[in-house]
């Protein structure tokens, strides 16, 4: 049975890798997407994934009981490969076999999986700080999913798109 610190290290490592692989996917999708709005959205999401990672790391550093997280990552083995933003999705985009709608579908699936993952970590944590940090990161992924869904709806003409949002989709004003 693994220790609480090894479980937390695993969760942190997975979160960091999700943000990094998401960024790489979004940069590649932005490069390959023909639609200017799609390019803008994918580029924006790549930048936001970088910001999420920096914010996540800063939150961990600032929390007294979690400040040793960097050394924990060195002490415990790596997690299994990421299920979505892996080599298969990147290969499909590089080879040109994935169009913008497919990239949006893959991205929305990843965001849903990230939301579920971060939610499970937050709910299962006995540590209030850990729960708060993972809840915060989860909310950022909810916003990404909603933005991707809006773009998908716009392209498929099944929803609304507000080119420059007049309000924040996360309910924060």
Image: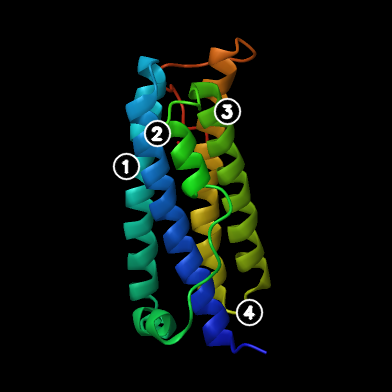
Q: Which of marks 3 and 4 is nearer the N terminus?
A: 4
Q: Mark 2 points at which residue?
A: 94
Q: Which residue is drawn at 42% across and 31% down?
A: 95
User: Which marked residue is nearer to the observer: mark 2 or mark 4?
Assistant: 2
**Label 3 – label 1 distance at C-alpha:** 18 Å
**Label 2 – label 4 distance at C-alpha:** 42 Å
Q: Which of marks 2 and 4 is nearer the N terminus?
A: 2
Q: Mark 1 points at which residue?
A: 47
Q: Name the residue under label 3.
A: 149
Q: Which of marks 4 and 1 is nearer the N terminus?
A: 1
Above or below, 61 against 96 in this view is: below
- Label 4 sits on a secondary structure element that is loop
**Label 2 – label 3 distance at C-alpha:** 23 Å
Contact (Cβ within 8 Å) of mark 2 with mark 1: no
Q: Name the residue under label 4.
A: 126
- Label 3 sits on a secondary structure element that is helix
Above or below, 12 against 147 in this view is: below
Q: Earlier in the sequence, mark 3 or mark 1?
A: 1
- Label 1 sits on a secondary structure element that is helix
**Label 4 – label 1 distance at C-alpha:** 32 Å
Q: Which residue is drawn at 40% across and 33% down?
A: 94
Above or below, 114 against 129 in this view is: above
Residue 52: image location, x then y, percent: 38, 53
Residue 142: image location, x then y, percent: 56, 43
Q: Residue at x 35, y 79 (%)?
A: 70
- Label 2 sits on a secondary structure element that is helix
Residue 60: image location, x then y, percent: 39, 72
Quarter of the picture containing the N terminus is bottom right
**Label 2 – label 1 distance at C-alpha:** 20 Å
């Amino acid at each position: 049975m693994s220790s609480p610190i090894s479980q937390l290290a695993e969760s942190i490592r997975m979160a960091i890798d999700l943000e990094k692989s998401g960024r790489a996917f979004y940069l590649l999708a932005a490069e390959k997407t023909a639609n200017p709005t799609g390019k803008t959205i994918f580029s924006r999401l790549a930048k936001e994934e970088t910001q999420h990672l920096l914010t996540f790391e800063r939150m961990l550093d600032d929390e007294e009981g979690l400040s040793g997280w960097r050394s924990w990552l060195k002490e415990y083995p790596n997690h299994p490969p990421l299920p979505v933003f892996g080599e298969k999705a990147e290969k499909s985009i590089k080879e040109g076999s994935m169009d913008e709608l497919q990239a949006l579908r893959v991205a929305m699936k990843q965001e849903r999986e990230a939301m579920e993952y971060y939610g499970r970590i937050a709910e299962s944590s006995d540590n209030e700080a850990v729960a708060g940090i993972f809840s915060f990161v989860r909310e950022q992924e909810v916003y990404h999913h909603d933005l991707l869904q809006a773009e998908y709806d716009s392209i498929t003409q099944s929803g609304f798109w507000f080119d420059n949002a007049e309000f924040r989709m996360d309910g924060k004003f």
